[in-house]
Amino acid sequence: MNFFETTEPPFRFRQGTRPLLISMPHVGTHVPPALAARLTEEARQVPDTDWHLERLYDFADELGASVLVATHSRYVIDLNRPPDNQNLYPGQDTTGLCPVDTFDKTPLYAAGDVPDEAEISARVDAIWKPYHQKLTAELERMKQLHGTVALWDAHSIRSVLPRFFEGRLTDLNLGTGGGTSCDPALADALLRIASSASGHTAVLNGRFKGGHITRTFGNPAGGVHAVQLEMTQASYMEEQLPFAYLPETAIRVQPVVRRMVEEVLEFVGGR
């Protein structure tokens, strides 16, 4: 049996002043040393990270948003999966709550000693639960102050991943749980903005409809409008090692992302 422990806090958090929480559940890169020792050399590079999103969303503080950022790699535990590991896209291949392979379907564990149920439970307790408890608490705090609030779940992914989709992925993938996690009028407004991005493609509830966070916390009738944006990494960075941020590329899409976030704030009455 492998035991799990970590000394790294499960998240970083900055509290804002307006009714918007930006969540970044896949930006973490920390892997506890004992776990890293079990991984392959490739896995220790954590290639499936949502790289540089804090930099891409560097306008968040200026807009007064609260920001919740994961610290641990999704290889430790995926914060955007349900704790029971149910497949969010039935019939399609996905990675799990505690992944055992990369997006390219190469094994994570050098000796095949994948986590057992006890280890998975320990990871849930140490990292998954605190992150989701903070999401819950911050949304409730904002609701008490503002009434209606928004959750923006920020993601990025390689533009070509045959395991998950054919061909090249749309650049700006807005997900609202198939229309359940936010007001349809807001979703339509966001799609119009995304579609205005010159040289980029956009879709609403296409391949990525929103993960566990969007689907769980989005409750328009209850005053919480949740949206996931899954961006192609080619829109702002190098998709291969060393995964460098490309300012001259990012500058073409970052203003559009900001306009979408501003639209969400305007919709929920954030002044």
Image (spheres, rainbow, N blue to C red):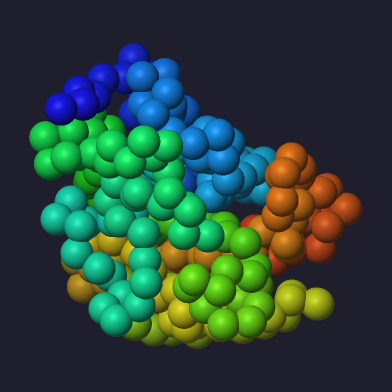
Judge whether residue 145 can be spotted in this image. Answer: no
Residue farthest toward the left in the current orientation of the protein = 118
- Compared across the picture, whether 130 is left or right of 163 comes to left
Q: Quadrant of residue 135?
A: top left
The residue lying toward the viewer, choosing from 244 and 35, is 35
Q: Quadrant of residue 222?
A: bottom left
Q: Position of residue 65 (x, y in %)?
A: 49, 45
- Compared across the picture, whether 253 is left or right of 227 comes to right
Q: Quadrant of residue 193?
A: bottom right
Q: Position of residue 251 (x, y in %)?
A: 81, 56
In the image, residue 15 above or below residue 98? above
The residue lying toward the viewer, choosing from 94 and 134, is 94
Question: Which residue is at a point 20% across and 23% down the rendered structure image?
Answer: 3
Question: Which residue is at a point 47% across and 83% down the rendered structure image?
Answer: 206
The residue lying toward the viewer, choosing from 125 and 165, is 165
Residue farthest toward the right in the current orientation of the protein = 248
Q: Position of residue 229 (x, y in %)?
A: 51, 65
Residue farthest toward the front in the current orientation of the protein = 111
Question: Which residue is at a point 28% across and 41% down the rendered structure image?
Answer: 114
Question: Which residue is at a point 83% across and 48% down the rendered structure image?
Answer: 247
How many dots with numbers? 0
Q: Position of residue 223 (x, y in %)?
A: 26, 64
